[in-house]
Image (tube, coloured by chain):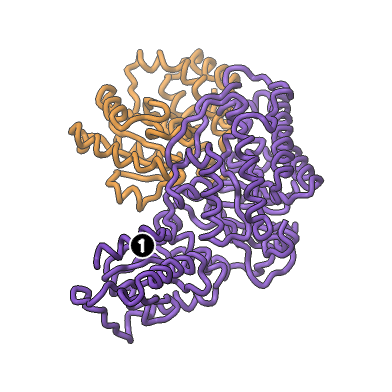
Chain colours: A orange, B purple
């Protein structure tokens, strides 16, 4: 079958169709990795670009990601069986005092769409929790999100906690959110700031390579 | 409503000689009187006193009475988290698990939640400054309120269950209309429908789901005799046109939008537009000069200043330095004098040299008042007034002088002394008071300490 069809259905957010097509591809004997990369991740990559270029918005990304997850659930056991590993592992959360998670969720979806394994720590996450999760899960990158000018300062606390735990030179830290800027990223000594979810995913992939 | 106010004339789309200025000082108002965000959002006295401080220091043509988009959500069952220095955040979504629509019997009344406190503060503000200042009542827009109630699943619902989204939005619209009625009855001149989530959807989705609710709300506000404003946060550039079609009297945008470009659209509909002063990079972290320059540059970038309101991009962060608010006010109220200040600030490096006093060898305490201009800047007038009271009290026992930033040599003096904020008072060459006007007792003690 043409895996482009899976990509197109994913971009349209047609979760049930994606599930059917992925099953069909499996039944036809295609490798799980090929279906993942040429069907699901290819579709999600286009979604990421369109989101970055303001061609689509939050609802479109959410339904596309849901479609990807439906297809990926079928592939997961086959990928494990075949010994295929994620291209990297990151953890993500909104910083302590911040409950706004739309941006964080979008970044997570884009990262999964790039083949990364993402540990979602949720909202209102203490600096120590970011660090402990990175250690326990073996994450290569910590991603911090903040929507408020009053909570973005916690990102510097996360860096301090990384230093205290002795992982600052082993784990990268990325920061993002509405009030965050590249200048702020440099000021607090984080490794990267990206202005949108798709760029964040690209940067994380580069850090994990 | 004031009989003559430049904001009023702007909302009526008339040409004005000067521009209107509306500082969105919500939690930031608390900083002016040393109260936390939670105190000004929950305590009537703290709220009223802080709003009066905003009115006194920033000399606004209009000001919001309460900037908290969670008031309705709290009443409708959302749990809130309360930081000290920002408005509360919604922690739980009562419709998160079940896609139902609440009964209209649950709509907020004048007795629910924090509404009684807000209404009392509104009436007091109307009484205190209503003859000079237009007062804004802010309500949570229908889409953001639906998001508070339903959570992020609302976005999925737009694909999975359009009918449900329409029904939920109809309920939220009824809530907006109820809140508008309550606030207008309490004397509010402008109802701002604040809907940050609007920037997260396409203009097509806006037309499908939101055109009808917003049109209905703005029509309702107009029938009740008040003006309306549509506040949006984030990059909603693509939706400015469809927002205009819902027919608000004005629109307010943040720094993510190219305001001059957006104004070309709003001008076609004869709708006023304002906002845009960056909250973090300029208001929170910038200098006074940065703030003045941003405002004047923004004005200069407009083809036509009719239908334009000078305002921050959204609710000012709590910790915005007071002097930055004063700087914006001064740039709006005295643009030509501020232009001259900025020119002199840039040119001040070259020609003139000033001799600073030998502060270690003064014969008596020296009070130096650094102002933008105590004749035209409200905060500077009050600061100078405090110094004059002290001078009258201490008489010849102290020396006192004012340095206005309108004069080039005073700009050089400020640079030489390291004066960062205006107005401020230095005693014997050391910073004693910055931006916030000291009480008589505080001032006397500071002088006595060096006598």
Left or right: B438 as drawn, with respect to B116: left
Vertical position of residue A145 compared to residue B164: above or below: below
The chain letter under disc 1 is B
Please tell me in which quadrant of the rendered image residue B205 appears.
top right
Horizontal and vertical percent position of residue B158: 65, 29
Left or right: B367 as drawn, with respect to B199: left
Residue B297 in view, yes or no: no
Horizontal and vertical percent position of residue A149: 43, 45
Please state which of residues B15 and B364 is positioned toward the viewer in this rendering: B364
Vertical position of residue B367 compared to residue B223: above or below: below
Q: Quadrant of the N terminus of chain A?
A: top right
Horizontal and vertical percent position of residue B365: 27, 72
Vertical position of residue B140 compared to residue B270: above or below: above
Left or right: A57 as drawn, with respect to B219: left
Left or right: A6 as drawn, with respect to A120: right
Mark 1: give few (<14), some (14-19) or many (20+) Cα within 10 Å. Answer: some
Residue B250 in view, yes or no: yes
Q: Quadrant of the C terminus of chain A?
A: top left
**Residue occupying image coordinates x 48% and y 38%:** B38
| Residue at the bottom extreme, as displayed | B351
Disc 1 is placed on an element classified as: helix
**Residue occupying image coordinates x 42% and y 81%:** B407
Horizontal and vertical percent position of residue B26: 53, 47
Task: Name the residue beneath numbered marker 1.
Answer: B443
Please state which of residues B385 and B79 is positioned toward the viewer in this rendering: B385
**Residue occupying image coordinates x 33% and y 23%:** A85
Number of marks? 1
Please tell me in which quadrant of the rendered image residue B56 appears.
bottom right
């Amino acid at each position: 079958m043409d895996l482009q069809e899976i990509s197109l259905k994913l971009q349209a957010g047609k979760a049930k169709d994606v599930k059917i097509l992925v099953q069909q591809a499996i039944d036809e004997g295609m490798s799980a990795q090929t279906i993942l990369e040429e069907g699901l991740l290819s579709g999600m990559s286009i979604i990421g670009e369109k989101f970055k270029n303001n061609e689509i918005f939050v609802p479109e990304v959410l339904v596309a990601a849901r479609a990807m997850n439906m297809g990926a659930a079928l592939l997961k056991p086959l990928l494990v069986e075949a010994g295929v590993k994620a291209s990297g592992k990151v953890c993500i959360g909104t910083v302590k005092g911040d409950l706004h998670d739309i941006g964080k969720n979008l970044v997570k979806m884009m990262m999964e769409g790039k083949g990364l394994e993402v540990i979602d720590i949720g909202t209102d996450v203490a600096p120590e929790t970011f660090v402990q999760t990175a250690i326990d899960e073996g994450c290569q990158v910590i991603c911090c999100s903040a929507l408020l000018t009053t909570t973005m300062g916690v990102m510097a606390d996360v860096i301090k906690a990384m230093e205290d735990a002795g992982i600052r030179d082993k784990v990268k830290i990325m920061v993002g959110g509405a009030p965050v800027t590249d200048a702020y990223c440099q000021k607090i000594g984080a490794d990267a700031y990206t202005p949108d979810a798709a760029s964040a995913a690209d940067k994380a992939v580069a850090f994990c390579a | 409503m004031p009989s003559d106010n430049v904001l009023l004339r702007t909302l009526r789309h008339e040409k004005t000689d000067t521009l209107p200025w509306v500082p969105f000082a919500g939690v930031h108002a608390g900083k002016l009187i040393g109260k936390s965000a939670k105190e000004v959002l929950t305590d009537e006295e703290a709220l009223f006193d802080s709003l009066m401080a905003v009115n006194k220091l920033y000399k606004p043509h209009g000001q919001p009475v309460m900037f908290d988009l969670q008031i309705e959500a709290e009443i409708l069952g959302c749990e809130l988290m309360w930081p000290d220095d920002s408005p509360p955040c919604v922690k739980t979504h009562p419709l998160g698990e079940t896609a139902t629509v609440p009964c209209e019997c649950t709509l907020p009344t004048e007795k629910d939640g924090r509404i009684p406190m807000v209404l009392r503060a509104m009436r007091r503000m109307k009484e205190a400054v209503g003859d000079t200042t237009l007062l804004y009542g802010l309500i949570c827009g229908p889409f953001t309120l639906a998001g508070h109630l339903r959570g992020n699943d609302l976005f999925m619902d737009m694909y999975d269950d359009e009918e449900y989204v329409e029904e939920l939005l109809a309920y939220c619209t009824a809530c907006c209309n109820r809140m508008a009625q309550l606030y207008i009855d309490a004397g509010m001149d402008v109802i701002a429908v604040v809907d940050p989530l609007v920037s997260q959807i396409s203009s097509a989705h806006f037309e499908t789901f939101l055109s009808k609710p917003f049109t209905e709300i703005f029509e309702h506000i107009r029938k009740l005799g008040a003006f309306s404003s549509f506040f949006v946060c984030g990059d909603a550039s693509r939706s400015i046109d469809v927002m205009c079609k819902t027919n608000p009297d004005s629109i307010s945008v943040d720094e993510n939008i190219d305001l001059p470009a957006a104004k070309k659209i709003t001008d076609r509909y004869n709708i006023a537009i304002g906002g845009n002063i960056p909250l973090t990079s300029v208001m929170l972290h910038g200098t006074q000069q940065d703030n003045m320059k941003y405002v004047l540059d923004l004005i200069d970038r407009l083809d036509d200043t009719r239908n334009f309101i000078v305002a921050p991009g959204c609710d000012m962060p709590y910790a915005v330095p007071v002097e930055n608010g004063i700087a914006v006010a001064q740039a709006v109220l005295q643009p030509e004098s501020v232009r001259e200040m900025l020119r002199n600030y840039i040119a001040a490096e070259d020609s003139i040299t000033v001799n600073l006093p030998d502060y270690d060898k003064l014969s008596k305490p020296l009070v130096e008042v650094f102002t933008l201009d105590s004749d035209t800047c409200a905060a500077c007038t009050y600061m100078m007034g405090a110094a004059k009271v002290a001078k009258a009290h201490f008489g010849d026992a102290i020396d006192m002088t004012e340095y206005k930033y309108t004069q080039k040599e005073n700009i050089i003096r400020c640079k030489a002394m390291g004066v960062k904020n205006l107005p401020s008072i230095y005693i014997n060459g050391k910073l004693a008071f910055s931006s916030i006007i000291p009480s008589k007792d505080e001032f006397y003690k500071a002088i006595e300490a060096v006598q």
